[in-house]
Image (tube, rainbow, N blue to C red):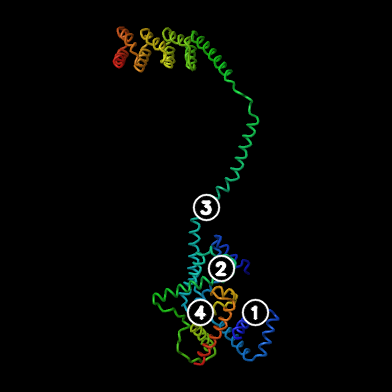
Amino acid sequence: MQTLTDNVLMLKVKSGDLDKLGLLYERHKKRLFGFFYNMGNNPSISEDLVQNVFVRILKYRHSFTGEGPFTAWMFSMARNVGNDHYKKISREGVSRGIAPEQVDKGTGDYLNETMDQEGNAQMLTKALGLLPSEKREILLLSKYRELKFQEIGEILGCSEGAAKVRVHRALKDLKTIFLQLETR
Amino acid sequence: MDEKFEIWAMDYMSGNLSESEAKEFEFFLEGHGEYREKYDDLLKAWELLQAIQTPEPSESMDEAFFTMLSSEMEKKEDKAPKQSVISMLSGILRPQWAIGIFLLMIGLGVGYFFRPEVEPIPTQIMAANNETEEVRQKLVLTLLDQPSANQRLQGVSEANKFENADDIVIRALLKTLNSDPNVNVRLAAIESLTNYVDKPEVRQGLVQSIPNQESPILQITLANLMVALQEKASIEPFKQLLKQKQLDTTVKKRIERSIESII
């Protein structure tokens, strides 16, 4: 039971009640971790990036107006944290961390259904990884259904209609890549 | 049409349409096979997206977060006490100050309202002062004539209270200095007379009393006073005093030194 909405909690954080950030963290840590992980970062880096998001939330807490939903504000922060990270690693010439599931183990010999399911999950993650990052990003933002298209549009800097079209096309591309991997 | 369909399909899938709008979309799909297929593909892709699994973050992420949060809270608390002390003080003092000032104002108001209607009349004060001086003069003269040394001492100390003693009092004090049998009374008379050393008759009276003094303490006191006043007229009486055989040797030396310093 969430008696206190995210926005109320964040406004409390803003007014100096910092320990309320702990509740927000507990509510959103998995979602944020999933966002960074599925954007192609390894678990350790994903955890660091989640941490960075909350550091940034604390730093910029005074800019939270409470007009839009907290999740939209939080994902804007997450997106900036992610972009900063990609800029940094591309500048340093470090290869992107690859999630273990994305590594093609090259077995290709599925003997039973369980293994087949695991293979599907790996293939799906791989398909996601093969999508261009902006498409991957919009799919991950829409995955949790908490954000409305208008809010996704705000995060990405486009209109609500454009956000819907982009999600639609990204889903289509995901399925195409997945089918290609499946038929290989 | 494609873009319009894409938006429409996303709205339908995410439940953004009203009941009638949803039915309209379903009716459209029934009539258009190729769009039906497209929608089915979209739905499958959405299911695929939902099927994407994410591992659980490790406990070390929680540790790192809560360590960061507690250090931020400590930083904030370090800044906080100043504010809380100020706010605490102001919280305590503000009502008390208000009450204090309010009571002070009432006090001043009441005091002003009940103030005594005294218009000081200078002539009355002067008359009262003159009257007091006269009474004190009589008192001094009476006390100095008393047989008790104690009362005569009291008379001398009363004489000290005059702002400006008149000739009668000064004469009485000089008479005490020259003829009072008690050394302490004479000593007190000298002290009293030093208040009026700017009057020539006082200086003259003091110089004239030098040969009359037999007590060493009075002789030394007068010698010191004459040095302080640089009274040259006192040299002759001191020289007469030095001729006395029974003069104390300490006093003798002292007077000699005094004569030297006056010269």
Label 4 close to label 3 by CB (< 8 Å):
no
Residue A67 location, quadrant: bottom right
Pick whichever, B29 or B214, lies toward us.
B29
- At label 1, the amino acid type is Gly
Give the spatial CA distance, label 3 vs label 2: 27 Å
Q: Nearer the viewer, mark 2 or mark 1?
A: 1
Residue A130: x percent and y percent? 48, 84
Q: Nearer the viewer, mark 3 or mark 1?
A: 1
Other residues around mark 3 within 10 Å, as few (<14) / some (14–19) / many (≥20): few
Residue, x 38% and y 13% (percent of image)?
B218
Q: Nearer the viewer, mark 4 or mark 3?
A: 4
Q: Share a chain, discs 3 and 1?
A: yes
Q: Nearer the viewer, mark 1 or mark 4?
A: 4
Question: Which residue is identified by label 3?
Answer: B83
- At label 2, the amino acid type is Leu
Q: Subunit of mark 4? A: A
Other residues around mark 2 within 10 Å, as few (<14) / some (14–19) / many (≥20): some
> Height in image: B1 above or below B196?
below
Q: Share a chain, discs 3 and 2?
A: no
The circle on residue B15 is 1
Residue, x 50% and y 85% (percent of image)?
A127
Give the spatial CA distance, label 4 vs label 2: 26 Å
Give the spatial CA distance, label 3 vs label 1: 51 Å
Q: Subunit of mark 2? A: A
Question: Which residue is identified by label 2?
Answer: A24
Q: Share a chain, discs 4 and 3?
A: no
